[in-house]
Amino acid sequence: MTSNLNALLAEQHVADLTRAAARYREIPSRPLWRSGPVVELRPARAEDEAATRRLAALDDAPALEGPILLAVVDGEPVAALALDDGRVVANPFARTAHAVSLLRLRADHVSHVSPRRRRWIRLPRARFA
């Protein structure tokens, strides 16, 4: 009788463990790590020329020239920054303040590509008598 009771308790315990493990295997409906829009900062390519001109037209500014950094939010170009003069054009109908600040930060990194040289200070040597 005791062995039958132990077998029954063991079966129930295994069933409880199986149900508990099934909860951990459930895949959430949306990824937990993604909480906002995807922002891409990249150099503008030849095929992005129309997008940068459209941004300039929306912003009522002259078109950017020279090397350009582009901010793309969820696949849509929203802001561009000229690396030569630092001018920015952005879509006035979208929230672009964060994208523009990221562009300025990235432009600062790109413009300081060469590491700064450490400047050595020459100190007088101590002379012992």
Image (tube, rainbow, N blue to C red):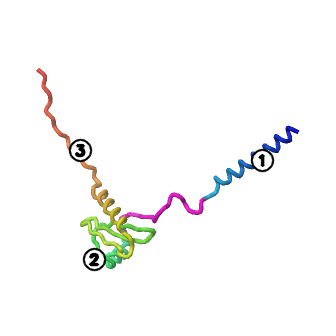
Q: Which residue is mark 3?
A: 118
In this picture, is 6 found above or below 37? above
Query: Which one is nearer the viewer's eye here, 35 or 100?
Result: 35
3D distance between C-alphas at marks 2 and 1: 73 Å
Q: Residue at x 82, y 44 (%)?
A: 8
Whether the residues at callouts 2 and 3 have beta carbons within 8 Å, the answer is: no
Q: Is residue 75 left or right of residue 21?
A: left
Rendering coords of residue 86 (x, y %): 26, 66
Can you tell which quarter of the image residue 121 is in?
top left
Amino acid type assigned to the residue bearing label 1 in the image: Gln
Whether the residues at callouts 2 and 1 have beta carbons within 8 Å, the answer is: no
SS state under label 1: helix
Q: Residue furthest left?
A: 129
SS state under label 2: loop
* Dot label at residue 61: 2
Q: Is residue 36 left or right of residue 92?
A: right
Query: Which one is nearer the viewer's eye here, 30 or 110?
Result: 30
Range of magenta residues: 28-44
Q: Which residue is mark 1?
A: 12
Whether the residues at callouts 1 and 3 have beta carbons within 8 Å, the answer is: no
Amino acid type assigned to the residue bearing label 2 in the image: Ala
Magenta span: helix, strand or loop, mainly? Answer: loop
SS state under label 3: loop
> Does the magenta portion include 57?
no
Amino acid type assigned to the residue bearing label 3 in the image: Arg
